[in-house]
Amino acid sequence: MALAEFNLIKQFFTRPAKHENTRLSVGDDCALLSVPEGYELAITVDTMVEQVHFFPDVDPEHLAYKLLAVNLSDLASMGAEPVAVTLALTMPTVDSAWLEAFAKGLFALADKYHFDLIGGDTTSGPLTLSVQAMGLVPKNQALKRSAAKVGDLIYVTGSLGDAGLGLKIKQGYAGQNTQQALQRFNTPEPRIKEGLAIRSLANACIDISDGLAADLGHILTKSGVGACLDYERLPLSTVVMEYMQQTGDWQMPLIAGDDYELCFTLSAEHARQLNIACTCIGVIEEGQGMRLIRNGVSASFNNSGFEHFV
Ligand code: ADP
Ligand code: MG
């Protein structure tokens, strides 16, 4: 390893580990994590590529925040508690100001959700960032996509379409009160607390990265069930409603990605025990696919999530 690379890692990505399960952090060939008795490790990785996942003018602090948030969101949807992440960083040049801002965004989330950066890889090339996140979940309690049951109610946390509106604003849509939507697009909040709160109540769960319709579709396929969604019940912010009134684009909250809310299903009995901010939007039924009821009638819509290889 070249000195420049060594110094870079030392300067920007090395700090004392805080989590009790981190036994060895940055600086050796591997990091070491201990997994407490009765728990299993939930592991996920996500990559972000310039031009594909973010704009070249992105604020590096926001970029780090979002890169981690999308991984933490996967842990949240399984009901896992974050422990540690690794970071693979490929960048064209070493820009200290950029790295400093990036590390600031990264450690802001690490402090907020109590996990360590325990290792990674640093290479030169077109700007590409991968984070692998690891979390702990009690054995056999992880929330899977495959366990939705007929009769379950379908819930979502937060509100839908705000990040989608943020993207439209970045692409030139001139709306009012853009701050909230841009914030949801730039720095989504992983629903860790909510994932832990529903772990003992929900049957199936997924995080909404590609749009509600596409992601709920994964639950339906994996669980071998269908769903009926009530459009009027979708939780929408004032800015998203204003956008829809101005453009007529009523499908946006169903198909826009990047919200990182949780969509989960549970029995009516368990639903009564929910104590997080969430909204019931429909019900799991027999069959396959999704029916959408809008204005009292069945509505069809363009149900295709974001695809990389088309
Ligand atoms: P190796 O060649 O054995 O894979 P490296 O020389 O790539 O190790 O990295 C040295 C140490 O620095 C390792 O502990 C590795 O995990 C860590 N590391 C490398 N890049 C990063 C990074 N971007 N963020 C955090 N840790 C990193
Ligand atoms: Mg090695």
Image (cartoon, rainbow, N blue to C red):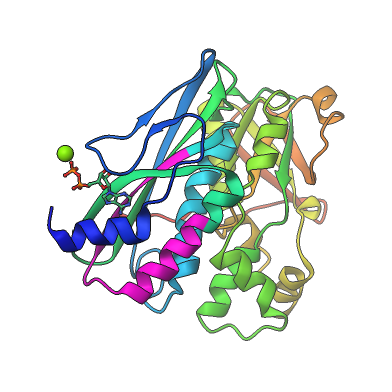
Q: Residue furthest left?
A: 2
| Residue drawn where x is 83% and y is 37% of the image | 275
Q: State the residue in front, 90 or 241.
A: 90
Q: Quadrant of residue 216?
A: top right
In the rendered view, does 111 fall on the left or right side of 247?
left
- The verdict on residue 77 being magenta is no
Magenta span contains residue 97: yes
**Residue for point 50% across, 79% down:** 171
Q: Looking at the image, is 197 positioned above or below residue 211? A: above
Given residues 269 and 304, the one toward you in this image is 269
The C terminus - image quarter: bottom left
Part of the protein shown in magenta: 84-107
Q: Is residue 310 visible?
A: no
Q: Is residue 276 visible?
A: yes
Q: Is residue 2 left or right of residue 127?
A: left
At which x and y percent is residue 160?
68, 57
Report the residue at 23% width, 55% height from top. Answer: 122
Q: Residue at x 43, y 45 (%)?
A: 16
